[in-house]
Image (cartoon, helix red, strand yellow):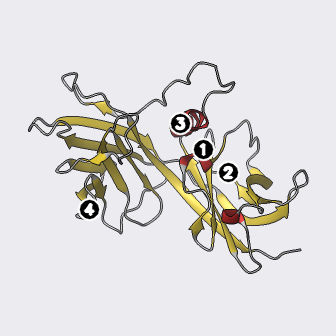
Amino acid sequence: MIYGYISTDTTQHYVKITRSAGYFSTSAPEGISNASVAIYNGDETYLLTEDPDTPGLYLTEPYVFGVEGETYTLEVSVDFEGKGQFEEYTSSSYLPYAVRMDSIQLKMSDYFDDRLDIYFYGRLGDNDENYLSFQAYRNDYALSDSLINFGLADDEYIDKKELDGVSCFSLDMEEEQYYLEPGDIVSLQVNSITKEYYDFLWHAQLELYGSIPIFSGPPANAETNIKPVNTSNKTPLAGFFTAYSSRRKGTVYVSD
């Protein structure tokens, strides 16, 4: 599997390369070392180096960031089988324009007891289509650190540019991980993503939720955008590479 990203944040972006484990395996997927990994946008090329403490994790320099409106291409040369035969893979992603975040607001739900909703006020990015993912934080601790908890929205949910309060997250205050104390800082991160990545996340979430009803057929696998450079590559591959813009806003929780 090859999975990675570049965003507008100035940070160490990563590409992770692993060998798939068996369905019933309890071990983490094995990281694959000694790959050649690069990300470029036509003007600049970022060479990624492997983390010495984490096999298969390849990092950019910490000053790297993506630029809105640019298209980024990933190139990977990797020996999946460990036999000295390197295969080449590539993927490209447009980096959408970011949302404008004016503020967020916390409100108790009108429909459910003990649920606190996070509302977003601002403006959509200047894109032909807008697809968003949301992540929530409490005092910089991620409340949505797993794929199944990512919030997603598309143009059918958000049908206007100016956003006068869009419900993005609902925190169940009866659950320990979501419980807030007065003075806690709640933050919302809004990522502008491509339709391709939105579809990948949505289909991956459907797989994680499982089939409904229980005896219905299995969902289709989430589609990868990692492609072999030539048809001689024989290793079956899954994964995704994406570029996205990111904005974040916070507020202090005050109990009623």
Residue 93 position, x and y percent, is: 43, 41
Label 4 vs label 1: CA separation? 35 Å
> Disc 1 marks which amino acid?
Asn
Residue 87 position, x and y percent, is: 18, 34
Q: Residues within 10 Å of mark 1 (few under 14, many from 20)?
A: some
On screen, residue 196 versus residue 120, left or right, reads left
Query: Earlier along the polypeptide chain: callout 4 or callout 1?
Result: 4
Q: Name the residue at the bottom extreme.
A: 183
Query: Circle 2 is placed at which residue position?
Result: 124
Query: Circle 3 is placed at which residue position?
Result: 204
Front position in the image: 155 or 199: 199
Residue 50 position, x and y percent, is: 23, 58
Q: Nearer the viewer, mark 2 or mark 4?
A: 4
Query: Circle 1 is placed at which residue position?
Result: 127
On screen, residue 38 versus residue 69, left or right, reads left
**Can you say whether 3 is above or below 113 in the image?**
above
